[in-house]
């Protein structure tokens, strides 16, 4: 029996989140970066870059995946367990590697790159073990960390990306309303979270009937569990007067959007209301600062000053916002576009960024809990456009 190291298995119709011309434009931008740095081939290994340049979002399950881009070729490298699904979901060619011999993955990559070339790789993703295998199999003349340049490319959204992100923001709102309807005294966090997740998945399926459905999730926190932005869901039961944190995250073809809101069950005490209203004011002020020409660091310092004037800055726990695109809670991050003191990126039209101030008051103090509002904004020629629709603040979000 002939047991090849790799082969092509292509069947079915191609189904992609974007048009072929959209991926060609992204690849053209990448090839311009490659030419500038003298890179002959890029070997991408991360979920976000493979999805960005090809449309294919892999499920590793212990196996490596890749996208190899040269001046003329774009080839995804996938494991045999996936059969032809990677080809149906990618723009360009696809090679399947087999398990019969260790490192057939690298032999498949080698068949596209050849040896002795200048190779681009992702320094923030490729492991030391896999980098050693890259050097052994491809024998590059030299190698270059291409990840920072690709991140800068991804920070600027195309009209097609912005259209998808708009729909994602609308789906996040659907989840938010479903969560609000599910909030009642005695209900568990997990029950409320499931209501929001189910509503979003059904909405995504309605809007994108040809998509793959996975990864959409909700973080719904109550009481002390609101102190961290990324605290997981528990079975804690809601009590009257609880502070709540609503977080909906629809995932559409690898693209992340979000809605985050502070709520209270039934009533809000005076101390909590004061903190909540201050955070809402910071949220509104922060959104007014997001415009072309503003730097991330400068926006951050202005909001810092706003909180400091109110003796609240010591309760801030992280940055005030971040970019959107191909990212998730377990892959991807456009770290060059975050509202933090150490990021000097200047906002430009076509960027998409959140405003999400958060204050955390320790348990046992008046107003204890975590307060966070989160809206998604598209930077325009003259300012910004807020594409989040679910209301924020006490007037709408004291519920149950």
Image (cartoon, grey):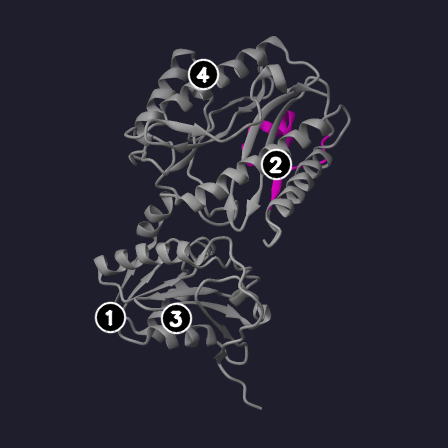
Residue at coordinates 56% horizontally, 59% vertically from top-left? 59
Residue 141, which numbered label?
1
Position in image of residue 299 (x %, y %) = 34, 25
Q: Quadrant of the C terminus?
A: top right
Helix, strand, or loop for circle 2?
A: strand
Mark 3 → mark 1, Cα distance in angstroms: 15 Å
For label 3, the residue is 133
Choose the circle earlier in sequence order: 1 or 4: 1
Helix, strand, or loop for circle 4?
A: loop
Q: Look at the image and tell me whether residue 393 can be seen.
A: yes
Magenta span: 216-236
For label 4, the residue is 312
Q: Quadrant of the N terminus?
A: bottom right
Mark 4 → mark 3, Cα distance in angstroms: 51 Å
- Residue 31 falls left or right of residue 189: left
Mark 2 → mark 3, Cα distance in angstroms: 39 Å
Looking at this view, is 11 or 184 the one in front? 11
Looking at this view, is 77 or 237 the one in front? 77
Q: Are marks 2 and 3 in contact (CB under 8 Å)?
A: no
Q: Look at the image and tell me whether residue 333 can be seen.
A: no
Mark 1 → mark 4, Cα distance in angstroms: 54 Å
């Amino acid at each position: 029996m002939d047991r090849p190291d790799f082969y092509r298995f292509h069947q079915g119709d191609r189904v992609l989140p974007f048009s072929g011309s959209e991926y060609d434009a992204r690849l053209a931008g990448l090839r311009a970066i490659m030419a500038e740095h003298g890179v002959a081939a890029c070997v991408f290994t991360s979920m976000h870059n493979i999805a960005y340049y090809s449309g294919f979002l892999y499920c590793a399950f212990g196996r490596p995946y890749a996208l190899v881009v040269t001046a003329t070729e774009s080839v995804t490298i996938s494991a045999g367990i996936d059969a032809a699904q990677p080809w149906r979901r990618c723009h360009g060619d696809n090679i399947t590697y087999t398990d019969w011999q260790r490192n057939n993955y690298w032999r498949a990559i080698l068949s596209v790159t050849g040896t002795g070339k200048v190779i681009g790789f992702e320094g923030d993703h490729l492991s030391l073990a896999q980098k050693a295998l890259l050097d052994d199999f491809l024998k590059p003349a030299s190698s270059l960390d291409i990840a920072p340049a690709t991140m800068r490319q991804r920070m600027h959204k195309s009209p097609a990306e912005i259209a998808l992100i708009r729909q994602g923001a609308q789906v996040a709102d659907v989840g938010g309303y479903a969560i609000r309807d599910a909030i009642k005294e005695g209900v568990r966090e997990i029950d409320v979270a499931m209501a929001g997740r189910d509503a979003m998945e059904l909405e995504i399926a309605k809007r994108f009937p040809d998509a793959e459905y996975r990864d959409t999730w909700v973080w719904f926190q109550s009481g002390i569990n609101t102190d961290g932005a990324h605290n997981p869901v528990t079975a804690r039961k809601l009590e009257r007067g609880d502070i709540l944190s609503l977080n909906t995250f629809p995932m559409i073809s690898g693209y992340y959007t979000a809605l985050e809101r502070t709520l209270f069950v039934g009533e809000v005490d005076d101390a909590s209301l004061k903190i909540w209203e201050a955070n809402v004011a910071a949220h509104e002020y922060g959104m007014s600062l997001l415009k072309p020409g503003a730097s991330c660091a400068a926006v951050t310092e202005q909001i810092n000053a706003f909180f400091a004037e109110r003796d609240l800055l010591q309760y801030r726990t992280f940055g005030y916002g971040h970019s959107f695109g191909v990212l998730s809670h377990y892959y991807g991050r456009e770290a060059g576009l975050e509202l933090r003191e150490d990021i000097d990126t200047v906002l430009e039209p076509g960027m998409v960024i959140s405003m999400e101030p958060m204050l955390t008051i320790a348990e046992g103090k008046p107003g204890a809990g975590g307060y966070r509002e989160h809206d998604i904004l598209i930077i325009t020629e003259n300012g910004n456009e807020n594409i989040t629709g679910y209301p924020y603040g006490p007037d709408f979000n004291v519920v149950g």
